[in-house]
């Protein structure tokens, strides 16, 4: 008998939760890491809970003891990520690292805030300034940062929570 391993399941678009529900009903152990995102819509900002890895979830099983064939016909799922004929195994350490970031209060993944250096380009990923790009100037206390943004034709200094930032690519 083999050992249990983690596998990645490809899902239909926005069907990760449906696939997870049906896989769990079939007796598989699943992990669907989710994050809270703030999106700008026509009527303002909306907060949504989304999959950390869109169109994917993780499944744990022993392929020698349990057939993985039903995964491809499960509602919401397309099948397993494969390398050739073999399903790709996800190292336990990777899944444990993801699990370690799950917040006990809401069950969502808490992403680490990036380390920033003065002059570095940043993008506001959350809050009222979502989508704006600017330059990191300095830290402003424990959890806030000072940025330089170009607004209304001039450069403006603004202070935002560090957790709202991402690095510009």
Image (cartoon, rainbow, N blue to C red):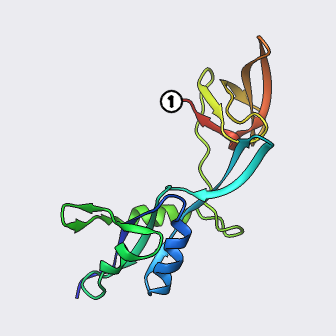
Q: Nearer the viewer, residue 44 or 59?
A: 44
Q: Position of residue 50 (x, y in %)?
A: 61, 57
Locate residue 24 relative to residue 101 in the image: left or right.
left
Q: Quadrant of the N terminus?
A: bottom left
Q: Tell me, yes or no, if residue 68 can be seen here.
A: no
Q: Residue furthest top?
A: 153
Q: Residue furthest left?
A: 85
Above or below, 151 relative to 24? above
The residue pinned by badge 1 equals 169
Q: Position of residue 45 (x, y in %)?
A: 77, 44
Q: Position of residue 18 (x, y in %)?
A: 54, 72
Residue 156: quarter of image:
top right
Residue 89: quarter of image:
bottom left
Q: Position of residue 113 (x, y in %)?
A: 62, 44
Q: Secondary structure at mark 1?
A: loop
Q: Nearer the viewer, residue 51 or 148?
A: 51
Above or below, 140 relative to 31? above
Q: Residue at x 59, y 24 (%)?
A: 120
Above or below, 63 relative to 76? below
């Amino acid at each position: 008998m083999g050992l249990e391993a983690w596998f990645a399941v490809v899902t239909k678009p926005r069907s990760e939760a449906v696939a997870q529900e049906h896989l769990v009903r079939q007796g598989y152990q699943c992990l669907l890491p989710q994050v809270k995102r703030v999106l700008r819509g026509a009527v303002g900002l909306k907060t949504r809970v989304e999959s950390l890895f869109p169109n994917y979830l993780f499944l744990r099983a022993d392929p020698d003891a349990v057939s993985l064939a039903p995964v491809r016909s499960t509602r919401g799922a397309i099948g397993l990520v494969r390398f050739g004929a073999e399903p790709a195994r996800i190292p336990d350490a990777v899944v444990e690292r993801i699990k370690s970031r799950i917040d006990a209060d809401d069950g969502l993944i808490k992403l680490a805030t990036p380390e920033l250096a003065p002059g570095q380009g940043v993008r506001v990923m959350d809050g009222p300034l979502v989508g704006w790009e600017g330059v990191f100037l300095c830290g402003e206390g424990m959890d806030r940062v000072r940025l330089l943004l170009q607004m209304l034709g001039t450069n403006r200094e603004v202070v935002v929570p560090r957790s709202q930032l991402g690095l510009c690519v």
